[in-house]
Amino acid sequence: MARVMKSTRGHNKLVLNIAFAYSANQEFSDAASMLANGVDQGLLKIEDVSANLVQKCLYTAGQPDPDLLIRTSGETRLSDFMIHQCRRGSTLLSFVEPLWPEFSFWQFWAIIFHYQTQHRSLDAERNRLKKMEGDAQQNYYIEGKEPKSDSKKKKEEPEVDSDEMKGERISNFLRKCQLGQELYVDRLAVNKCF
């Protein structure tokens, strides 16, 4: 798996996620640890942490939310699988009886056909959610609200922190995280005993 990830790292046309021994709880725990380490190391300020930054620390960072999720084995639950990414009505969930090894090409195409019949409503839901999120973000700034911080600290030590400085801090943090993940995959790809 690591060798495939390494060899397709630069590919960006299609995205296929296959999750082995995956847990959304572990994914959120890893994201929280990554952010806490970033703050501890001085790469981030606590005010930099936002829902958007948390999303950029998930395993699927940089990928769009899935259009389609296929759950094999006849189970009609996500089982802690991509819970955050499928949280909205913009992902078609398909629950099918066969186990993964028995899942056929024709069953796959039936699901794709069903997805095509639902695409317009899913797309409308995606657009509605994007607009709603954009409006909420805009209203947040229009009302003049700022991230919560310790008022005593502001009085003692006025900080000059522009949006540009914050953006640069976050970009540097995310680059460092990406590099760490790539190095980890590279080590796994070389190690034949995983």
Image: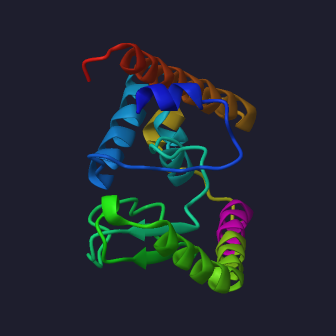
Q: Quadrant of the C terminus?
A: top left
Q: Is residue 7 above or below residue 92?
A: above
Residue 161 visible in rendering:
no
Image: magenta residue range: 132-142
Toward which corner of the image does residue 150 lie, by quadrant? Answer: top left
Magenta-drawn stretch contains 141 = yes
How many marks can you see?
A: 0
Between 182 and 37, the residue placed more toward the observer is: 182
Between 110 and 44, the residue placed more toward the observer is: 110
Q: Which residue is pictured at 68% across the width and 34% down the height?
A: 167
Toward which corner of the image does residue 116 lie, by quadrant? Answer: bottom right
Residue 172 visible in rendering:
yes
Q: Position of residue 85 (x, y in %)?
A: 48, 61
Q: Position of residue 99 (x, y in %)?
A: 28, 66
Q: Which residue is pictured at 64% across the width and 74% down the height?
A: 129
Q: Quadrant of the N terminus?
A: top left
Q: Is residue 43 above or below residue 118?
A: above
Q: Which residue is pictured at 47% across the width and 74% down the height?
A: 107
Taken as a whole, is the magenta stretch helix, strand or loop? helix
State left or right for residue 124 relative to residue 85. Answer: right
Q: Which residue is pictured at 62% across the width and 58% down the height?
A: 145
Magenta-drawn stretch contains 94 = no
State left or right for residue 135 relative to residue 8. Answer: right
Q: Position of residue 27 (x, y in %)?
A: 35, 46
Image color mode: rainbow
Q: Is residue 114 above or below residue 45?
A: below
Between 13 and 90, the residue placed more toward the observer is: 13
Q: Is residue 100 above or below residue 130?
A: above
Q: Position of residue 164 (x, y in %)?
A: 74, 32
